[in-house]
Image: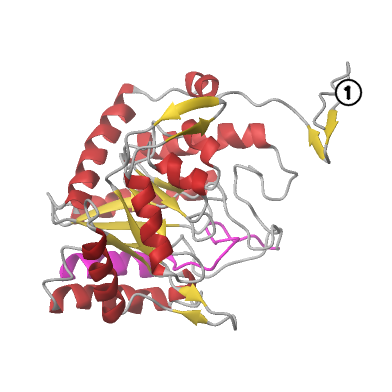
Amino acid sequence: MYKNTYKSGKRRLTMSFEFLKKLPTPKEICEQYPVSEKVARIKKERDLEIKKVITGASDKFLVIIGPCSADNEEAVCDYAGRLAKVQEQVGDKLILIPRIYTNKPRTTGEGDKGILHQPDPEKKPDLLAGLVAIRKLHLRVANETGLTSADEMLYPENYSYLSDILSYVAIGARSVENQQHRLTVSGMDVPAGMKNPTSGDLSVMLNSVIAAQHPHSFIFRNWEVKTSGNPLSHVILRGAVNKHGNCIPNYHYEDLIRVIDMYTEKGLANPAIVVDANHSNSNKQYAEQIRIVKEVLHSRNVNPHIKPYVKGVMIESYLEPGAQKIGCTPHIYGKSITDPCLGWKESEALIYDIYHQC
């Protein structure tokens, strides 16, 4: 039986949960760290541009690119600043969306969970400081670079802390089958990419889009809510893992055709495909992302039927190539502490390659 056991000066213990502190509501955090008129204008303009790509009103190509985990504010802002300079050169064909992932799913629950959990990855978790840190980071990037960003919605109840800043949301392979994630996406007004599950089941992925595009009534942050459906929800192909633990890519020409056929069968609004070039598509061999992106672009160019469906790629990239362990000495500025990433030099060259092939 659930019992409230609050006692003065003591923490509440219930069913193995230790309730440490009550966190501020999204409204309280947003009022403390508000969106400026400048950032609100930037978001409105960027949201419209990105929406036009998903709906087919624009033939620009989305490049969602950035670190596996946004572990360090200065390095992430440095990266986003460099990205903004490239955006100025490629804006007639590409929309660059900084990938600023502030919370990370962990296969076993171990490892870095992102700055939401640990603003300093070498210190103990502090969720209150984390909520402030993620909002300040996204605000700073938008204010300094003019680029609104993408984040993964790992915890649906936390989306409201960032809903007035983000221009793109991704639902990860481990979350896409979860009903609360699907229903929360149905209430968003920005594009949301639904990844295929780790099993690679494409029907599960498409079912998540069906759910996200329909209206729903459900419980959200202690409220009974009603949503109107999100017609901008779409699929992200990130590869799969079979029962033997082997990675199975799903970015090839035949995979794209299959997903397009499934879209046609389902009759969904705004059919769109984004290809995640890392994870199980690259078997986490980060340098392979360059080849994978180029193959996807080749598939778009050789078959005019594919081109209007494949609307973007997702790339893991940071200032320095590869990855490093948390707490390693020396710590390398701008190098991933989770999955290995492309370095800036290779990333910048790849963006220009994408530009010339689009």
Q: Position of residue 318 (x, y in %)?
A: 46, 60
42, 349: nearer the viewer: 42
Residue in front for this viewpoint, 119 or 155:
155
Residue 82 in view in this figure: no
- Name above or below for residue 307 compared with residue 38: below
* Count of numbered badges drawn on the protein: 1
Q: Amino acid at mark 1?
A: Lys
Q: Along the line of sight, which residue is nearer the eye, 245 or 350?
A: 245
* Image position of 346 (left or right of 323): left
Q: Residue at x 54, y 61 (%)?
A: 335
Residue at 51 percent of width and 68 percent of height = 198
Magenta span contains residue 93: no
Quarter occupied by residue 11:
top right
For the C terminus, the image quarter is bottom left
Q: Which residue is mark 1?
A: 10
> Which residue sits at x=40%, y=37%?
216
